[in-house]
Image (cartoon, rainbow, N blue to C red):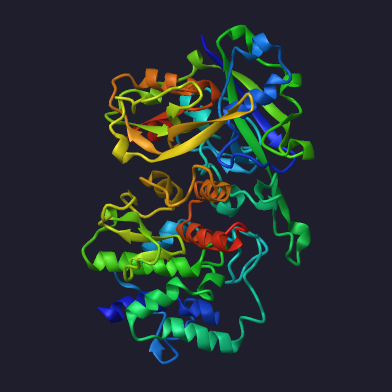
Amino acid sequence: MTKIQQVLWELRMDYIGHPYYVSGNAILHALGQHLAPETHAELSASHGMFVPGQYGTFPDEHSQSGSRPYLGSGLPDVVAYDDLFLHREASHPWLLDIRARDALNTQDLRIHGGHPTLCHETIMGRRDEQWKQFETTKWYVHAYLHADDPTVLPLGEDVLEDLQFGGKRNYGYGEVELKETQLIELGELDYSRLKGAETYLIELVTPFVLESEYHLVNGCTVPWWWAENREDLRFREEKILEQREVYRLQTVDHGQVVTYLGDHPIETAKNGLLRVGSHSRYGFGELRVKPLGEQKYRSEKN
Amino acid sequence: MSDVMLAAYRHDAHKFTGESHNDAREMFAGVRVNQSVPDGADGDAAALSRPQQKQEQTVPNHDNHYRLSLLSGETAYNPDYFTRSTIEGTVSDLIATKDAVTAHQRWLSSDVAAALNESVYHPYTSLKYHTLLVGALLDNYRAGNDFDTLRLVVDPAGEIVPFRTVFDGDRFGLRIDADPSRRPAARLGSRPWRSWASTWNRLTAHPLDTDGDKYDMTLDANLRRTLSWSTALQYIEDYADWRPDR
């Protein structure tokens, strides 16, 4: 049985670093300062997604429904596969349309020493005459851990507290505080929504690594179970930092959607949670399987 | 042909003059304004940028037609700039020109249209980019290109396709068209909805240096979070003006 540990951190200070996400590599490095080397060696970390601490309404594919005030600032229960992805899509479709959702979901920027810096909170309405009505939205970082040795998890709250991500840490940037964590047994989740569809899509939640200078991975091909080939896909170079050296990775950029050609969508979905391809330990290769034609499920839920 | 396209660039003149849709005048600077746009192009463009089901104030303290900046949070209201003479001069250049191709080009480079939102309920939207989207959809529909054949296409800077270019920047242009001309492109989907992030995410190449340029990556990250088309296009324009490294 495979467990994952979801972690939600609250950004306490502005962040200078990778603007798409806190990389799994950065999360592992931060945890390494609190863990014995043999424990640390067992761990894999997902990329940490930025989440606005806002009201929201559960998306259709979620096992729960209705609105919640804490949807961005807490970890709702997870009973089904799709529940795992609530916080892992940059456009955060759960945000309410009755609020200025694009303003709440884009990060305010400052400049520090020539670097673009992500603000740890968004303040709206402050400059207006009715200044007392201003609203502050905090940013959170959502990630999950898993371990080859299942006894390593859950990591204690003391280990997850008081971490820093990104650059300029000596100046206090990137400080986070643990907000919530929960352990999830992947084998006990409901994957039934992935049964019986004619067509499945695969969303690249994080980049898929094709080539790497670090492990000398070369000539990795686009998986045969994707309908798209190299000409159809967008690439992006990534970097990872190991022992103070920067290594370059060639990736299929995240956010793209490909058509699934395989016959085992549930197995693919489970593999995609623990990530596929090179550097999966550092957050790369996270995939989400989506069935096409969801009407049946929706009517059952309503 | 030209008259029909001009309707697109004149359909929201009442937002400059501060009139409500229902009380809007019929003439401005000697031309007919505030007429409805054919083929549903106005409604479809609106659906690309703001929720359609109910109209509610999304920002409690803001109920006027000046746009709020996604970048700074500030209102575009500037009492020194928005005088009666500005409206009569700059806006009539935009609205009253008799040539539709010229109107399109003026909208592409307009600052005054960028200062207004397309709906007081959604102050982060941009009247400038809403209008350019209306024009691009209308021109496509009139050429027989149904919505489900349309794509977002990335063009080199300065290459303006009449009516179909919706963004003209120093580094690249963006166009709505059925034919991608072997340029990076992504389909808009089967119906108009707030699909900016979804479409941007599926482009076959991004016109930004997302391999290593921190300012480009930060722009890209926020574009992947934005649903509204007019808000996103305005953000690209504002970001180019704001970034200190170029």
Q: Is residue B6 visible?
A: no
How many marks can you see? Answer: 0
Q: Position of residue A163 (x, y in %)?
A: 73, 29
Q: Position of residue A55 (x, y in %)?
A: 62, 43
Q: Is residue A67 above or below residue A183?
A: below
Q: Is residue B155 above or below residue A80?
A: below
Q: Is residue A134 visible?
A: yes
**Would residue B161 be found to the left or right of residue A108 on screen?**
left
At a point 55% along the width and 52% down the height, the residue shown is A102
Q: Position of residue A35 (x, y in %)?
A: 71, 15
Classify residue A221 by image quadrant.
Answer: top left
Q: Is residue A246 above or below residue A116?
A: above
Name the image quarter holding the C terminus of chain A.
Answer: top left
Classify residue B33 by image quadrant.
Answer: bottom left
**Would residue B33 be found to the left or right of residue A248 on screen?**
left
Classify residue B73 by image quadrant.
Answer: bottom right
Q: Nearer the viewer, residue B122 or A90?
A: A90
At a point 46% along the width and 20% down the height, the residue shown is A190
Q: Position of residue A178 (x, y in %)?
A: 72, 29
